[in-house]
Image: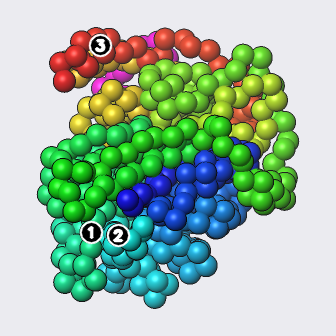
Amino acid sequence: MARLLHYSDIENVFDVPERAARLAGRIRHLDGPDAAVVATGDTTAPGVLSLVAKGRQTIDFYAATDTLLDTFGNHEFDYGPDALRGLVDDAPVEFVSANVRDEDGDPFGRREGVVPWTTRAVDGATVGFVGVTDPATDSLNPMAAPLSFDDPVAAAREALDDLEREGPGVDHRVVLSHLGGGDDDLARELDVDAVLGGHVHSRRNERVDGTLLVRPGVNGEAVAEVDLGDPADPDDRATATLHEPDGAAPHAGLESALAERMGAADLGEVVDRVADPIERTGAVVHGGECRVGNFVADAFRWAHDADVGLSNAGGLRQGDPWAGDVTKADLISLIPFEEPVVLTDVGGEELRGVLREMAAPDVDFGEDDWWHGHVSNARVVWDAESEEIVEVTVGGEPIDPDARYTVATSEYLLHSDHEYPTLEERHRIGEADIQYEVLADFARERGIDPEIEGRIEIRNRAAADGSR
């Protein structure tokens, strides 16, 4: 019976070539004549090597894993539409996208071979695929701002209708999705066997209204093996198993190719040394106050001598802990975006609103209990059960609603209305260097030795989780 091998959001797996080689080795070990390898976005970026290669390092990975299909994640657009068109033209995969439109409102990438739907013969079965991307991508990624994104459910439905009308007749219908939480809507609204998803970095393997929903997590931590079942037996539905990369022989050729690309970048300068490892897992950066978040927020505030430093947790990329020598490559791996640290000017009430948005109770991005920000020179006490700030100070003093405050943060937050809608371009009053350059300068001058200081306190989290 037909199998699909699914990976997604591998992002900075390329920054450790051996880790990427292990992931490719696991995919090759699972592969066979009854299987097809597919991806669901954020495969080209972000990451150190991605920044150096402008996403083209993924071409090596596609070839090593015999990947057949991919769709666009929000980070595929990190280097702009033209760079992505060039990558699509050169990559040995077919990109499936039903809801992305170009600068003129036409379907994106059709000239380079992007299709809204396609079919593949897998172990004697015909499998139809459609692809969709988060419609908030033009807000999530400033480089995607010239593009537009149609409603993914409507676009997928139209593509599936076209597939039925124009295609060869299919045994299985699969959505390649980079929607995150929107996968549930696809499952409820569409007649498909499986939604293979990404965007949200936690793993998933469950059913919604009878449709299999799968996410393999981030940075190559797992590969999903999807058995599509017997199309002649309605009770034999699609199932999935998540496999760890460890245990399979690494792909030596891929490791060598990526190591060569990384070596040419010359990013090995040691900026400081840390005695106690600094974790940067998803659970850490989205769990509340953490050492790596404090380091970034302190560096941002230092760059502008601002009243407050603010980092969005989603901008801190996950990876191996920092231990011993910390190099410039490590800093880029944490924030691999060529965007400056900006200085903003906000009123006291606006600042309170910004700090409330760190909890993001009204934003459907990530898991329900994720924390979305880190601060410097501020303290926030959040009650998760009542979803309100119960205490907030700057420099040890309550926020004065009539005062003005300067906040140093990522330029991205001025563009996006997805995470911190209170902050807008009109608040900008200054600009410093690119974020990872600011981190490097701060580390050289002040060192890397962040501590947990009680900047963020989340009360009643367990009670709030239990009520859902």
- Of mark 3 and mark 2, the one earlier in the sequence is 2
Contact flag, marks 3 and 1 (Cβ < 8 Å): no
Percent across and percent down for residue 224 are 45, 47
Q: Residue under label 1, please give it.
A: 171
Q: Is residue 78 visible?
A: no
Left or right of 443 on screen, residue 36: left
Image quadrant where one finds the C terminus? top left
Disc 3 target residue = 462
Q: Quadrant of residue 104?
A: bottom left
How packed is label 1: few (under 14 Cα within 10 Å), some, or many (20 or more)? some
Please give the residue where the numbered disc 2 appears in the rendered image: 125
Residue 392 x/y as whole percent: 36, 17
Q: Over which residues does the magenta segment extend? A: 393-403
Tell which of 422 and 237 is nearer to you: 237
Q: Please identify the quadrant where the N terminus is shown.
A: bottom left
Amino acid type, mark 3: Ala
* Residue 131 x/y as whole percent: 35, 66
SS under mark 3: helix
Magenta segment's dominant SS is loop
